[in-house]
Image: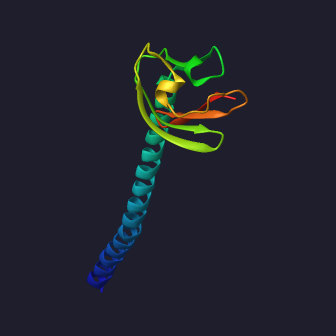
Amino acid sequence: MKAKKGISEIFGALIVTLVTLAIAVPLFIYYNSLYSANKNAISSGFNKLNEALSTQFTVIVLNYTPSKVYIYNYGNTIIYITQLIVNKQIINVKFELKPNQLVPLSEIAPNLPSNLANTTIIMKANGNYYTILT
């Protein structure tokens, strides 16, 4: 009889081990994918924040006409301007503002209204939106 008892203890330990592995493997796969998704989200957020911090420009207003409103890039990276929103009107542009470059707004978007007083202008630069004139 002792031989049978020993065999049942081995089978019992084997069954407990298999049940533990059957539960552990799906949990490992689930938490590993959850970790990867969070890691990618954090990395993406960090890259966006880094781009926002490296985008350094100022707006110089001499007069409220497009040729007298200037954008100056005082940072060390190129600013890619892809969109202007002027009073809810979207204007798609493709302009590179190099470091230490000063350009009038009329050079970025030539078809702006002649008077920009009381006009809201939002600029999309390096993937982020900035209010440049209100």
Q: The C terminus appears in which quarter of the rendering?
A: top right
Residue at the extreme left: 3
Name the residue rendered at 40%, 64% in the picture.
24
Name the quadrant containing residue 23: bottom left
Q: Nearer the viewer, residue 34 or 133?
A: 133
Name the residue rendered at 57%, 33% in the picture.
112
Would you say 77 lies left or right of 49 here? Answer: left
Name the residue rendered at 65%, 17% in the picture.
63
Q: Nearer the viewer, residue 97 or 93?
A: 93
Judge whether residue 50 can be spotted in this image: no
Q: Nearer the viewer, residue 14 or 100?
A: 100
Q: Is residue 15 above or below residue 81?
A: below
Name the quadrant containing residue 16: bottom left
Q: The N terminus appears in which quarter of the rendering?
A: bottom left
Q: Residue 2: x percent and y percent?
A: 30, 82
Would you say 132 lies left or right of 47 here? Answer: right
Would you say 107 lies left or right of 21 here? Answer: right
Q: Residue 110: x percent and y percent?
A: 50, 31
Q: Residue 46: x percent and y percent?
A: 47, 35
Counting every numbered tag in the picture gives: 0
Residue at the extreme right: 118
Would you say 35 lies left or right of 85 here? Answer: left
Q: Is residue 112 above or below residue 30?
A: above
Q: Nearer the viewer, residue 21 or 25?
A: 25
Q: How was this image coloured?
A: rainbow
Name the residue rendered at 73%, 30% in the picture.
118
Judge whether residue 17 can be spotted in this image: yes
Q: Residue 51: x percent and y percent?
A: 46, 30
Residue at the extreme bottom: 1
